[in-house]
Image: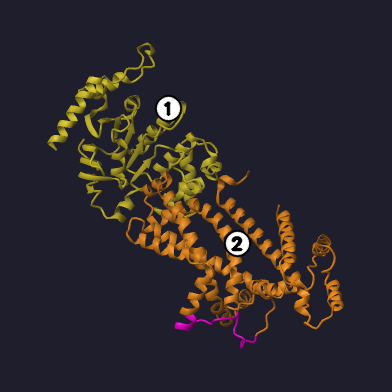
Chain colours: A orange, B yellow
Amino acid sequence: MAVITLFGVAVVVFCLLRVVPGDPVAMMVGPAASAADIAALRAHYGLDGPLPLQFLTWLKAALVGDFGTSITRHQSVLSILGAYLPATIELAFSALLVAILLGGATAVVATLLRQHRTSAAIDALNGVFLALPDFIWALILVLAFGVAVPLLPLTGRIDPSIDVPFATNFLLMESIITGRFAVAGNIAAHMAMPTLALALPLAAVIARVLRQALNEAMVQDYVLLARIKGMSELRLILHEALRNAVGPTLALTGVQATFLIGGTVVVERIFAYPGIGNLAIEAVINRDFPLIQGLVLMFGLIFILINIAVDLTVVALNPRLRHV
Amino acid sequence: MSEVLLGVHSLSVRADGGQRILRDVSFDLAPGEVHGLVGESGAGKSTLVKVILGILPRSMVRTGGNVVYCGRDLFTLPAPAFRALLGSEIALIPQDPLTALNPGRRIDAQLTDGFRLKQRLSWRDAEARAVTLLEEVHIREPRRVMRSYPHELSGGMRQRVLIAAAFALDPKLIIADEPTTALDVTVQKQILRLIHGMQERHRTALVFVTHDLGVVAQICDTTSVMYMGKVMEQGPTERLLAAPRHPYTTALIAANPRHDRPESGLKPIPAAVIAAMRAEIAAGDANG
């Protein structure tokens, strides 16, 4: 199933790239290049020949792990992805974590206060967060914490003056694990705004769906009986209702998380964050076909992995779905 | 009946729209005694249970009366003190065992809640107590049941688990809200015998809600017959069944199917009795 999806993605991207206007070879050579030079370059990058043949050539190489060479960077696509992907993974996971914590906490608080007038205010505020997309949040954050109150670094992933060797490209994780907390703090400060920009809209979605599910769970008989066992309201929400309410939220979070990955493209651009989103825009501008192809496939793979992870978690949380 | 464990005094409840749900309901319950609440659906039995347990829905308001437990007015009790009573001294056996257990938690977790939260027992001790409880409600393979989720158990088994949970902390008062209604007829009798046996062994006072006079005859010391939220007749069960004073009680007894005399068939409540009762209730409402 996943293989078919990836194959479909590969075919569509391959065709689209060659249909949209723009020629990588024309971008590479100057206007003075002769027709013969251009033809030679085309042949070198495998850009001559009919489309199906080009695709088969690419597929054959891709199946053994060779995704070609970037036209602009003259490096293998795989090594470029290896260098840029960890930054995006760290950003996306931080955003997902923040969104789940923020959205979950909002839903629990709103449920606690559901007989209060304040809960209407929480709903209204949540509606605003729901309505604004990630790149708007990015701009708001830039204005707030970059310009008005310059607290956070505006661009990049780490202060260029910090000169410590890293064994991997998972800079944040590595510095936390190795105990270099000052470095980790610097990286976290750089990541704060892009993370928040990506997390806030998702947090609003999670808060809304989870709150709805919690409200429904709170009137179930088993919650009533637990109340008669003398449990506190917070305990009722966390121990009795949440477990049964979290399923639909989680499924939706999986879908939304794929939007979050898509959102990294724009948000990484705004904050000049060196991840695959930023790389993707550069690759498209340069018509770097092999790199685009590899990137899109990578995005496809991430989507599939997220969905598998979500499905497994949903099953793990719902005893009735086990052993089937 | 000198000592009173639970005293319900002139309790009245109205719905949002103003309709009366409970009309001046009173009864006293001595420690270890069983009081039956009998009536058709809509008689206000469940509402009465909810008021006592402090879980009246938002759509209803208490307009008068109080509930006194061990000399303490439950309605003026601060919330934490009331929560402390629930579970440890007052427990509920719910009506529908299929919805009353949390589908996402294992039986061991749900059955040990009280031990762990109220008595601060360790998981291991709480588990041992829970297994003993399951044996007491005649569940075979208690250890397997402990590791099960509710959907893996039958309705009768789940009701046994809920009975075990209700008796777990040896409460002084248990409210059984039609605990056999949702079960198969064959299972009903076993569950009734089980509750009765547990109640006698633990000397627990029981408020038993039912629409079945046969059940009342078997286990209730005293009984209130309710109609439209009003107690029509109240007294010792034996006297009430042998020499009913209210025509509605008489009609209810007559309406109960007799398995020993199937030729008598089913008798509905006579329209004249209902009309007279409604007039009585309307007169009471006009005065109150």
Q: Looking at this view, name the residue that lies furthest to the bottom.
A: A161
Q: Which residue is the site of mark 2?
A: A258
Decide: is B273 above or below A212: above
Chain holding disc 1 = B
Q: Which mark is residue A273?
A: none
Q: In the rendered structure, the residue with mark 2 lies on which chain?
A: A
Q: Nearer the viewer, residue A100 or A304?
A: A304
Q: Is residue A282 visible?
A: yes
Report helix, strand or loop for mark 1. Answer: helix
The residue pinned by badge 1 equals B189
Q: Is residue A149 visible?
A: no
Number of the front mark, 1 or 2: 2
For this rendering, which residue is in front, A83 or B29? A83
The residue at the point 71 percent across, 67 percent down is A20
Q: Amino acid at mark 1?
A: Lys
- Picture quadrant of residue A36: bottom right
A151 drawn magenta: yes
Query: For the stretch drawn in magenta, what is the main secondary structure?
Result: loop
Query: What span is colored magenta in the figure?
Result: A145-163
